[in-house]
Amino acid sequence: MTPHTHTTSTERQRRVDFDTLAPLSIGAIIVAVVAIAIAIASHQDAGTVASAAGAGDAAATATSETTKAVDVKDVKPDFSAKEINPATEPVKAGPKTFELTATERKVKVGDKVYDQWTFNDQVPGPVMRVVVGDKVTIKIKNAGDSKLPHSVDFHSSRLTLGGGHVQVNPGDTGTYEFVAEYPGVFMYHCATAPVLHHIGMGMYGMMIVQPKEGFGADMPEYAIVQHELYASSKGIDDGVMDAMAFNGIPSHYTKMPIKVKKDARIRLFVLNAGPSQVSSFHVVGTVFDRVYEDGNPRNVSYGRQALMMPASGSGVFEFQTVGEGLFPFVTHQFNHAAKGAVGMIIAGDGKPGPGAIDEAKDGHH
Ligand SMILES: [Cu+2]
């Protein structure tokens, strides 16, 4: 950092805040943040299972039996969890068709193997984006090697059971249509009984329904789904999660941060898929200029620090990352952040920079 001869109180505050970080490279800062998150998480995880495999069979029979933990070395995953690029962009109005394939897989997530039920082999399922008034066609396929029927309930629809009346057996397909009538950020999820287990195993995702006039000024947009990861059927029943995540992998965006320009204005679409916990979404180092509760611009509020999102609740968050530096995003229920519901936005070079503070001093702000 450039030495300053005169410092405003704001600037001093900022320099004090980052004094301990200043000598570190950005890489070291990220490593430190990750290390802190992991340290807290592993402290809290002490005594829990080493592997999460085995939830599937138990959940399939809808019993409350605790499945035995299996050492990760003994479980061969079908694949590693997909790293989800959170970037999303506006779409044009018009009919849209989405194909979802339900699968039941063993997925390596971090250093554990979870039994997961998925849409398109990813948890959360794909982000779908439409415009108010669009006719939406959903085509569901259930993989031939599935053991269970699956289905999809769209909260953005006004269909019976949200579309969950179409139950699809292994190897079969199903289809239905609806018109997206309300703008917002909506959950979709498997609606096959027991629904708690089908969601707890990973069958959910986000549909963004744009207002006809759009969400507002052009800015980078990112879609983030907060959710729980469970290691056993009993864990799902009792709401005792093994880990928490944004977009599938605990703490993933602390290792693969979202990078934006300095002073960036950005828009986040955030959904709490649950199935059983609430989210208190917050971005460290900023104040939300505007929040659209449930993603509907008519539910606007200003100057927010956090939004309470119930299970299946959501929000659109607009804010500025002032200057350069690190802007972690969390659920401010910090025991959940410690379990992996934490990510990182890096503005500019990631070092705490003069940014808008210098501009303010020069009278350009
Ligand atoms: Cu299902």
Image: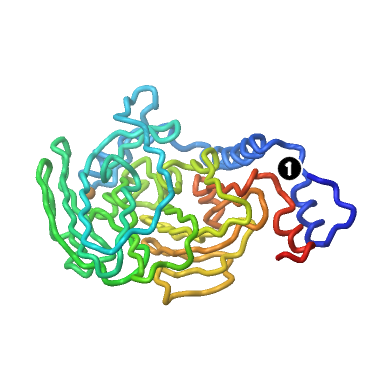
**Front in this rendered view, residue 104 or 284:** 284
Residue placed under numbered mark 1 in the picture: 21
Q: Residue at the location (49% across, 55% down)?
A: 220
Looking at numbered disc 1 in the image, what kind of residue is underneath it? Answer: Leu
Q: Residue at the location (44% across, 34% down)?
A: 110
Q: In the drawing, does residue 114 fall left or right of residue 45?
A: left
Q: Where is residue 13 in the image (x, y as percent from the top left)?
A: 79, 57
**Front in this rendered view, residue 33 or 355:** 355
Q: Where is residue 187 in the image (x, y as percent from the top left)?
A: 32, 59
Q: Where is residue 124 in the image (x, y as percent from the top left)?
A: 35, 47
Compared with 24, 346 (above or below) is below
Quadrant of the drawing holding the N terminus: top right
Whether residue 338 is visible to the viewer of this picture, yes or no, is: no
Q: Residue at the location (69% across, 44% down)?
A: 351
Q: Where is residue 327 in the image (x, y as percent from the top left)?
A: 61, 51
Compared with 149, 129 (above or below) is below
Whether residue 149 is visible to the viewer of this picture, yes or no, is: yes
Quadrant of the drawing holding the C terminus: bottom right
Q: Residue at the location (29% across, 69% down)?
A: 132
